[in-house]
Amino acid sequence: MKYLVLSVCALSVLGFIKPQYDSGIDQSLHWAQTPYHPLQQSVEVGRSFQTLVKFNKPFKSTPTVILAPIKYDFGDTLPQGFDIQLSAVNTVGFTITYVALSPATIFGFDVSWAAILDSNIYTYELQTNNLPVVKSNKEGNSRIQPLEVIFPENWSLKTAPNVAIYILGLKMVEAWPKINVYMGAITKTSAQFKIFVGQKGTIEFLRVNMIIGEKDTLLVGTITHKTKGGSDPLNSINPESERVKLYEEQITDEVFLKTPRYTLYGISGLYYNYGAFCRFLTKNYLLVKDKISVEIGTWQNSQLLEGAIQWFVYVPKPDAGVTDPDCAQVWESCNYQGDSFTVCDRKMSFPKDGWNKPVKSFKVPDGKVLKVYNEENLKGLSIRIEKDLPCMEVPKFSFLQLVGSLGDDKFWEND
């Protein structure tokens, strides 16, 4: 019996990769005196600027990447719109594309990013033009547009997670709105987020990015700036100066006082005076012991009336990992629940290797085939599984084998 238990443990370890983390700030799109960059120079809608971001060290498997803008800088002409797009994520880096959604001038952005290889961390990106509640309102009344996100079935969330949300894309017309995005009710299967719009502005497009994790691995918080009258330095125009205010927040959850831990933040709300440039900056973000600090501000002829940032602290669980991309993973229950084990480039017989439970759900790496049999030595009834399968209600199988790629001629000859 001891031999059988050790055998299953070895299979689990061999099929997982320890968590990895990397982060940085992309500052490739900035105001330039000459030559102008495409978003600053042209008035063509859809003009774009693309940059390649490379990780400091290659990941062992493709990570989850989260983008979080920390600085907006664009002109005072309406309509105004931008979109920050993530693409081509792989083990060595990814691509960011900055797109102008209107003829108005865009001077630049700073975008912080984090790459996380951990099966307990997820991201969700949503864009929408269907925003009837936050359309034009001549009276300037505040409006709230709720939107619901249904989490994919293959997410293994056991409880309601924590969620941080960031504004990646926005198109405003008619007047500068007060805008804020924040989370509403959250369960282990879905989350509601809300778009708050004040004043007389209209939002025609919105893209948000969310990072999602269990409460014992992801801590989330919000820091908000609100102008306090005309004496507030962020509400007074000074063409020569940058004006900032320091904000601090304390962490009390002991889980997130441990190391290693990692943090990121980004903009989730803004409101600035009509007729001036939108210049919203954050800087000197620090996590030291139990305290988070950040400076929120603006510069030159911009008046930042309100601003909100969301931050997260990520602590990997001691037993966290991700499935090796060359291995299949099998669960005892549907929808990737219950105990699991991995199957790499070898055979596994359940009774002999200490597994006496059913197999109900499967994750299969791209280009591979998992074959399951109800008799050993590749005999009896067999089923081919070529992609992830959340639930299979069939008679008990006792033998699994992960075989070559779909294009492997030898595999097809032996099939």
Image (spheres, rainbow, N blue to C red):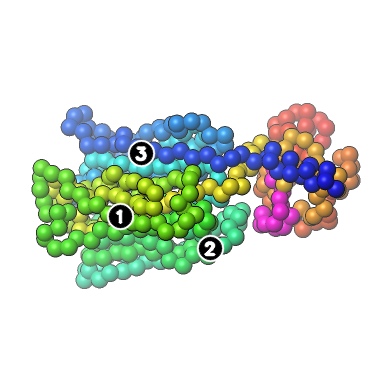
Quadrant where the C terminus sits is top right
- Label 1, label 2: how far apart the Cα atoms are: 27 Å
- Image coordinates for residue 350, horizontal then vertical, percent: 83, 47
Task: Give the total of numbered labels.
Answer: 3
Identify the image quadrant of residue 251.
bottom left
The tag on residue 25 is: 3
Q: Secondary structure at mark 1?
A: strand
Kindly report the secondary structure that dominates the magenta region of the rendered protein. strand
In the image, residue 311 sits, relative to residue 145, either above or below, namely: above
Identified by mark 3, the residue type is Ile
Mark in front: 1 vs 3: 1
Tell me if residue 128 can be seen: no
Please rate how many residues cluster around mark 1, counting C-alpha atoms within 10 Å: few if below 14, some from 14 to 19, many from 20.
few
Residue 140 falls in which quadrant of the image? bottom left
> Along the horizontal axis of the image, is 25 left or right of 272?
right
User: Of residues 279 and 60, which is closer to you in this image?
Assistant: 60
Instruction: Identify the residue shown where x is 26% and y is 33%.
Output: 37
- Snapshot quadrant of residue 226: bottom left
Residue at image location 24% in from the left, 45% down from the top:
73
In this rendering, position of residue 204 left or right of residue 150: left
**Residue receiving disc 2:** 160
Q: Nearer the viewer, residue 222 or 318?
A: 318
Residue 270 horizontal/vertical position (percent): 27, 56
Q: Do callouts 2 and 3 mark residues in contact (Cβ within 8 Å)?
A: no
Q: Earlier in the sequence, mark 1 or mark 2?
A: 2
Cα–Cα span, label 1 and label 3: 21 Å
The image shows residue 46 at horizontal and vertical percentages of 32, 42
Q: Residue at x 82, y 53 (%)?
A: 356
Residue at label 1? 248
